[in-house]
Image (tube, grey):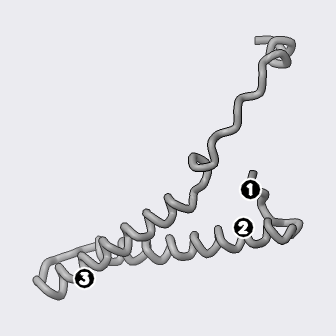
Amino acid sequence: MTGDQNARLPAPPPLPARWVDIRPLVAVGTTLWFLAFCGLLVARYGYQATTGIWLPTCLAGWILGLIGAGIMYWQRAASRRGARGAQRIS
């Protein structure tokens, strides 16, 4: 396509807000990491199962999910109050 043809194409419609909002994804992911961590704790200490690398991996996933949720909350608060360096949410 040439530049003239690109100029005539209409702008795509905006995505629905529920498809753009990442908060439910972060909440579900963090919750799943926490549930997996709890399940592995029960397996390891209740049934003497070998969890290998999975226990620290689930702990790291849960903690990083909490950190990510905190950063998202911080960015949204900064955007709402109009901070210059905040990412804008459309």
Residue that numbered label 1 is attached to: 89
Residue toward you, 49 or 15: 15
Q: Residue at x 37, y 67 (%)?
A: 32
Residue furthest left in the image: 47
Residue that numbered label 3 is attached to: 41
Decide if residue 22 is on the left or right side of residue 81.
left
1 or 2: tag closer to the N-terminus: 2
Tell me residue 4's x, y (percent). 86, 12
Rounded to the nearest whole Å, what is the CA distance between mark 3 and mark 1? 38 Å
2 or 3: tag closer to the N-terminus: 3
Rounded to the nearest whole Å, what is the CA distance between mark 1 and mark 2? 8 Å
Q: Looking at the rendering, which quadrant does residue 49 occupy?
A: bottom left
**What kind of residue is marked 3?**
Leu
Tell me residue 65's x, y (percent). 50, 70
How many numbered markers are drawn?
3
At mark 3, the secondary structure is helix
Closer to us: mark 2 or mark 3?
A: 2
Work out whether 33 lies above or below 38. Answer: above
Question: Are the residues tagged 1 and 2 within 8 Å (C-beta)?
Answer: yes
Q: Residue at x 18, y 87 (%)?
A: 45
Residue that numbered label 2 is attached to: 76
Q: Quadrant of the N terminus?
A: top right
Q: Looking at the rendering, which quadrant does residue 70 occupy?
A: bottom right
**What kind of residue is marked 2?**
Arg
Closer to us: mark 3 or mark 1?
A: 1
Instruction: Classify 10 Å Cα crowding around label 1: few (below 14), some (14-19), many (20 and above).
Output: few
Q: Residue at x 39, y 77 (%)?
A: 59
Instruction: Classify 10 Å Cα crowding around label 2: few (below 14), some (14-19), many (20 and above).
Output: some
